[in-house]
């Protein structure tokens, strides 16, 4: 009898590397790993590691363009920031990964999908619900949630099965894509402790930022950022550019207590230089082009949109309905915003639009 084929969302870390062998043993299955490039590094090493462990195939999908254009920018236009702090980087990436997994399942005739999420995090729900919406006939397997092993037990299993995984105990758990970087665990679990500088990778500490500000002009067309300093840029290049320049000036650090989907509170540390810069610019341009009533209702929509994304409901009719409203509000959100980036501050110092509702003639004294 032919073996079952399972598509495994694979990061190259300890959890998912152990999952490859565990799925082979416990499900007598062929395992095809799938890694979505949403801004990861060292992808070739990830692929070779999966094949070395025993994966039948190791798929690498470049999802960066689709991620920014079809997931990040709609959330930006909606103003979706969870609990007014979190730009939803990881939460936006999971439904796209689920989409790629279901597409791979169809292509390779898989009957099950698998992921390495634990039972305490949000991602298990996001992936499970997304797959359920896209391909309800597919079974979802969550080995880490099933086996309940400690990290030491996982390491022991890896050593016993000759799994070539870096098993040194890391201080932090890190997840990153183009829209942001999240850091958890270690001393960060004590909400009283200041995050050490080693927790950050994209942003400079204030003491090492330039002593002179930089001014950046961001152009928008119907709510979508399209240019920097008058130069049109593809979405991917625009986000990368802002991550670099805003991070250099110490912009984008977030430290807050978050209410997780699973019902617990968690201390979360994020970096989102481009995200915070674009949200600030976009909101300022909206203040110039939306009516008071539009702005007030959109604030409510922004909060609801953020909750829907955070809770893993990207593929819901509710989110599509909100997108229709948001798109309507963005028809006049065209113009430019001038930003001053300086010592961790992202300050709007100018905004202009051919669709502005502001009238100098009416406002002047």
Image: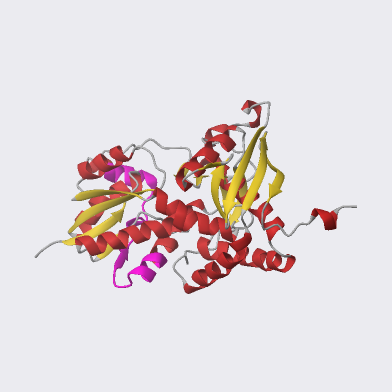
Residue 152 among magenta residues? yes
Position of residue 85 measured from the top left corner of the image (x, y, whole percent): 62, 52
Residue 250 sits in which quadrant? top right
Q: Nearer the viewer, residue 326 or 229?
A: 229
Above or below, comparing residue 198 to residue 20 in the picture? above
Colour setup of the view: secondary structure
Q: Is residue 177 visible?
A: no
Position of residue 17 measured from the top left corner of the image (x, y, whole percent): 29, 46
Q: Is residue 278 visible?
A: yes
Q: Nearer the viewer, residue 40 or 330?
A: 330
Above or below, comparing residue 116 to residue 12 in the picture? below
Q: Main secondary structure of the magenta part?
A: helix
Position of residue 45 measured from the top left corner of the image (x, y, whole percent): 29, 37
In the current view of this chain or complex, which residue is farthest to the right? 365
Q: Is residue 65 left or right of residue 192?
A: left
Identify the image quadrant of the N terminus. Answer: bottom left
Residue 49 among magenta residues? no
Position of residue 108 measured from the top left corner of the image (x, y, whole percent): 20, 60
Residue 305 sits in which quadrant? bottom right
Residue depicted at x 46% and y 71%: 316
Q: Nearer the viewer, residue 342 or 98?
A: 342
Q: Which segment is the magenta one?
A: 129-158
Q: Is residue 314 left or right of residue 135?
A: right
Residue 346 sits in which quadrant? top right
Residue depicted at x 36% and y 68%: 134
Residue depicted at x 24% and y 64%: 106
């Amino acid at each position: 009898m032919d073996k079952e084929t399972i598509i495994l969302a694979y990061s190259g870390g300890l959890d998912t590397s152990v999952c490859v062998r565990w799925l082979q043993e416990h499900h007598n299955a062929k395992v095809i790993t799938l890694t979505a490039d949403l801004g990861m590094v060292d992808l070739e090493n990830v692929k070779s590691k999966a094949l070395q462990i025993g994966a039948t195939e190791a798929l690498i999908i470049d999802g960066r363009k689709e991620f920014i254009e079809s997931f990040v920018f709609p959330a930006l236009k909606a103003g979706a920031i969870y609990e007014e702090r979190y730009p939803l980087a990881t939460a936006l990436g999971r439904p796209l990964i689920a989409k790629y997994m279901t597409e791979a399942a169809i292509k390779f005739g898989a009957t099950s999908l698998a992921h390495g999420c634990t039972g305490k995090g949000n991602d298990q729900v996001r992936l499970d619900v997304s797959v359920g919406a896209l391909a309800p006939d597919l079974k979802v397997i969550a080995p880490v949630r099933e086996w309940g092993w400690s990290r030491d037990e996982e390491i022991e299993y890896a050593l016993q099965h000759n799994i070539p995984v870096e098993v040194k105990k890391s201080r932090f758990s890190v997840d990153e894509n183009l829209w942001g970087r999240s850091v958890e665990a270690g001393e960060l679990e004590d909400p009283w402790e200041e995050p050490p500088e080693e927790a950050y990778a994209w942003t400079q500490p204030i003491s090492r930022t330039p002593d002179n500000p930089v001014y950046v002009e961001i152009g928008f067309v119907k709510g979508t950022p399209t240019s920097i300093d008058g130069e049109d840029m593809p979405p991917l290049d625009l986000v990368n550019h802002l991550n670099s320049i805003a991070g250099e000036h110490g912009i984008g650090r977030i430290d807050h207590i978050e209410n997780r989907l699973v019902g617990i509170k968690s201390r979360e540390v994020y970096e989102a230089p481009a995200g915070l810069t674009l949200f600030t610019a976009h909101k300022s341009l909206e203040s110039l082009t939306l009516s008071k009533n539009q702005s007030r209702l959109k604030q409510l929509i922004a909060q609801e949109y953020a909750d829907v994304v955070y809770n893993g409901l990207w593929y819901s009719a509710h989110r599509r309905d909100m997108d229709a409203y948001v798109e309507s509000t963005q028809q006049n959100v065209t113009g430019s915003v001038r930003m001053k980036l300086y010592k961790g501050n992202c300050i709007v110092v100018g905004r202009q639009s051919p669709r502005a509702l502001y009238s100098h003639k009416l406002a002047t004294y």
